[in-house]
Image: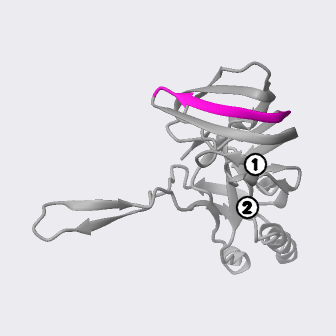
Amino acid sequence: MNYFIYNGIRSSDMGVRISSKNIFSAPKFDLAFQSIPGRDGELINSNNRFPNTTVSYTCFIPARSIQELSEKVTAIKAWLYAQPDRYHTLSDSYDTVFFRKAVFNNKLDIADQVNKIGTFTVNFTCHPYRYSYAGQTKTTYTASNFILTNPYPFNAKPYLKLNGRGDGNLTIQTPTSTNVWEFTTLNGYTECDSELMNFYHDATPKNDTVSGEGFPLLYPGENAIIFDGGITSIEVMPRWVMV
C-alpha cells in the first residue's frame, strides 16, 4: 500500500489511502522571453532560480459509518493544517531515494467529496528540489584536499562545520573554478549553512568574520576541498539535490 509521510506522520496511519500521485512533476525554470522588433526569435531573461512546485496525491478515506468518517476527517485536517508557517519533510513510498521540503497551504474539502463516494486531492507546496537521503549524512574530514563528487547536475548547498582556532582558509576547487573563503577568529568552530546563507557559532552570527564570494557550493562532478591555517577538520553534509 502506497503512502506519504508529512511532518513525521504517515498517511496510512491516518486512514488515508492513495490512488495516484503526480509522480513526474518538476518545476519550471523562472525566466521570461523578450521580443525585439526586427529581430528573429526572442531574448531569454533569466532570474536564475526555480520557483516552488506542487506535489499532489489523489486520496480516499474508507469508513464504516458517517461518525467514523467525521472523526478521521477531523484528525486529518488537524494533521495537515498544523504549523502552516514552515516547511516540513515530505516523503513517500513512490520515491525511496529523495524527499522534499513541503508545506500544506491549500483548501481541503474532504467531507463533502467523500460523502459522495468521491476522491479528494492533497496538494503540497514544495521547494523546487528533491533532496537525496544520501546527501544528508555528515562526514568528518581531518586531512585537507579531499574530493566530494556531486552526482547530480545541480549545485548543492551544503552544511559545513569548520573546527579549529585562529585564522584559516577554505577552498573549493573544480576543473573550471576556484573559490576561497577566509575565516578569522575561529573559536572552536564556525558553522556554515549555504542554504540559509549564514555563517554562525551556536546562535551567534559570524558573517562579519568570513570573507569570500557568496557561500560554499558543491558543483556537479568533482569538488576538491582544501583547508589550512587554524582549521583542523571539516564536517560536511553535502545535501545533494535533483528536480
Give the structural element (helix, strand or loop) at label 2: loop
Question: Residue 145, relative to residue 164: is it above or below?
Answer: above
Q: Nearer the viewer, residue 1 or 230?
A: 230
Residue at x 61% of width, y 47% of height: 130
Which amino acid lies under the numbered mark 2 shown in the image of this protein? Tyr
- Res. 104 visible in picture: yes
Name the mark on residue 62.
none
Q: What main secondary structure does the magenta stretch of the protein show?
A: strand
Q: Position of residue 113 (x, y in %)?
A: 66, 77
The colour scheme used here is one colour
| Residue at which label 2 appears | 87
Residue 173 part of the magenta segment? yes
Q: Position of residue 100 (x, y in %)?
A: 67, 51
Which amino acid lies under the numbered mark 1 shown in the image of this protein? Thr
| Residue at which label 1 appears | 209
Residue 72 part of the magenta segment? no
Question: Residue 143, relative to residue 193: is it above or below?
Answer: above
- Residue span colored magenta: 164-175
